[in-house]
Image: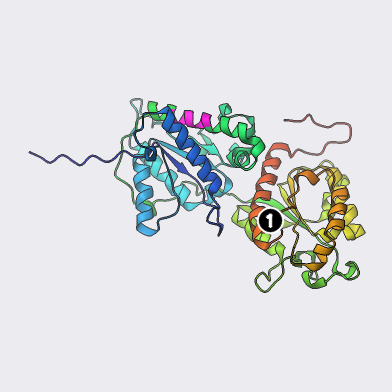
């Protein structure tokens, strides 16, 4: 009697494909992990899976080398549904592109009776994406999913997970996505295949150009016009030389570090000028991309900077995020914090409620805050950036 092949153990119900955040913090991907857990909980309740571990697969990066590749390949060869989390970072990731390739090769090996391949890819937005910005392989796949709600469409799961006030929208979107995963999983039965050689696969996103324009503006008083007694130690010849956390451990300017973080997040960065953001210069212009403005609290002691910041505040540019770092080890700043904060609030009173000012008092906190600022700016740019019309012809809000 011929030996029967050993049946392959059942794979995960869905495979969550996402781009890792390049961060030294071991909890850097905790928001993706939260989404994954919530989706698994829903899928478990909506199905008759006997084991919670069978609900989903998420690459936690805990394995390395051959074992890691093997684990990915096995999950892709056995899962029912592939759920890619769309973001610019996702489409520049070689591993995410290989995961997509592996699953599509499996789909192509199992055509339906009508000759078409099964549809078992359910994209989800981690951050907002425009359809025309997607790589070719992703453009034909529906990703808007209106049932997940307007907040999800505008902000993606990242925006919904970060803010407690968005919790109801997050719950609606997560439940709706899980429901869609189960619908497709039950209606489209894929046969397992032998795991592919993952490292040898090509990325499916070779045509994707993720570099979106970003304007990075540093607002710092001229070193020659600092208030009497202000230590020039943190300043350089140019605004981009400023480093509020300057030390032997962190000698680089904040601009150069922000530039590195922006590049890692898929942006093509150019140096901005505060004078470029005056309302009269913006009239009739379509912004080319989002922006991030980093403000030295001492900028309000300089009349030129203060007037320009007030004009920026009047312009109401929600796609320009603002970060104000405070160095608690800087004795000058600590002693004048109350006055500086009061002056900043008076100058930026329209934007004050949504500024990142409270917790950025160390280099490591800036490292965590800057990607959040990028995401806020990018989300607002996709939602609200429209050409400035002549006075009296304001466009209707799209909200």
Most foreground residue, 228 or 156: 228
Query: Quick one: quadrant of the N terminus?
Result: top left
The residue sitting at 48% across, 52% down in the picture is 94
Residue 245 seen: yes
Q: Which quadrant would residue 240 be assigned to in this image? A: bottom right
Q: Position of residue 233 (x, y in %)?
A: 79, 72
The residue sitting at 18% across, 41% down in the picture is 5
Q: How is the image coloured?
A: rainbow
Prevailing secondary structure class for the magenta stretch in the rendered image: helix
Q: Is 175 positioned to the left or the right of 162 in the image? A: left
Residue 181 on the magenta segment: yes
Q: Position of residue 337 (x, y in %)?
A: 82, 59
Q: Position of residue 23 (x, y in %)?
A: 56, 57
Residue 235 lies, with reference to residue 348, above or below; the image says: below
Most foreground residue, 302 or 162: 162
Residue closest to the far left = 1
Residue 144 seen: no
Q: Is 97 positioned to the left or the right of 223 in the image? A: left
The residue sitting at 38% across, 35% down in the picture is 80
Query: Quick one: quadrant of the C terminus?
Result: top right
Q: Is 295 positioned to the left or the right of 139 in the image? A: right
Most foreground residue, 279 or 357: 357
Name the residue tied to disc 1. Answer: 269
Residue interval drawn in magenta: 175-182
Residue 39 on the magenta segment: no
Residue 274 lies, with reference to residue 222, above or below; the image says: above
SS at mark 1?
Answer: strand
Residue 214 lies, with reference to residue 136, above or below; the image says: below
Q: Position of residue 149 (x, y in %)?
A: 61, 29
Number of residues whose C-alpha sits closer than 10 Å to that of mark 1, classed few (under 14), some (14–19) or many (20 or more): some
């Amino acid at each position: 009697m011929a030996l029967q092949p050993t049946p392959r153990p059942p794979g995960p119900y869905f495979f969550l494909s996402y781009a890792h955040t390049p961060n030294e913090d071991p909890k850097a991907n905790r928001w993706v992990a939260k989404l994954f857990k919530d989706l698994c909980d829903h899928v478990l309740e909506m199905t008759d899976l006997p084991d919670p571990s069978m609900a989903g697969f998420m690459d936690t990066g805990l394995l390395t080398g051959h074992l890691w590749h093997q684990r990915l390949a096995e999950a892709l060869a056995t899962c029912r549904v592939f759920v890619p989390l769309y973001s610019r970072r996702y489409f520049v990731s070689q591993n995410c592109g290989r995961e997509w390739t592996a699953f599509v090769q499996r789909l192509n090996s199992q055509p339906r009776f009508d000759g078409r391949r099964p549809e078992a890819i359910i994209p989800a937005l981690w951050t907002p994406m425009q359809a025309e910005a997607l790589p070719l392989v992703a453009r034909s796949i529906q990703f808007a999913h209106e049932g997940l709600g307007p907040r999800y469409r505008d902000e993606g799961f990242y925006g919904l997970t970060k803010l407690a006030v968005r919790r109801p929208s997050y719950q609606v979107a997560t439940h709706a996505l899980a429901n869609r995963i189960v619908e497709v999983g039950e209606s489209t039965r894929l046969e397992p295949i032998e795991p592919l050689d993952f490292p040898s696969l090509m990325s499916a996103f070779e045509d994707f150009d993720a570099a979106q324009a970003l304007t990075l503006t540093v607002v710092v008083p001229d070193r020659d016009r600092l208030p009497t007694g202000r230590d020039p130690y943190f300043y350089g010849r140019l605004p981009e030389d400023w480093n509020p956390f300057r030390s032997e451990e962190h000698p680089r300017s904040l601009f150069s570090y922000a530039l590195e973080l922006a590049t890692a997040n898929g942006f093509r960065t150019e140096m901005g000028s505060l004078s470029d953001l005056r309302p009269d210069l913006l009239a009739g212009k379509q912004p080319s991309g989002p922006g991030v403005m980093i403000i030295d609290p001492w900028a309000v002691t300089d009349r030129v900077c203060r007037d320009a910041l007030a004009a920026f505040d009047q312009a109401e540019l929600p796609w320009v995020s603002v970060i104000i770092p405070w160095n608690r080890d800087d004795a000058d700043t600590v002693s004048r914090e109350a006055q500086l904060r009061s002056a900043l609030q008076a100058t930026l009173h329209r934007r004050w409620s949504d500024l990142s000012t409270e917790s950025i008092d160390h280099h490591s906190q800036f490292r965590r805050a800057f990607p959040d600022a990028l995401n806020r700016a990018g989300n607002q740019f996709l939602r609200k950036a429209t050409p400035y019309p002549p006075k009296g012809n304001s466009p209707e809000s799209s909200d």
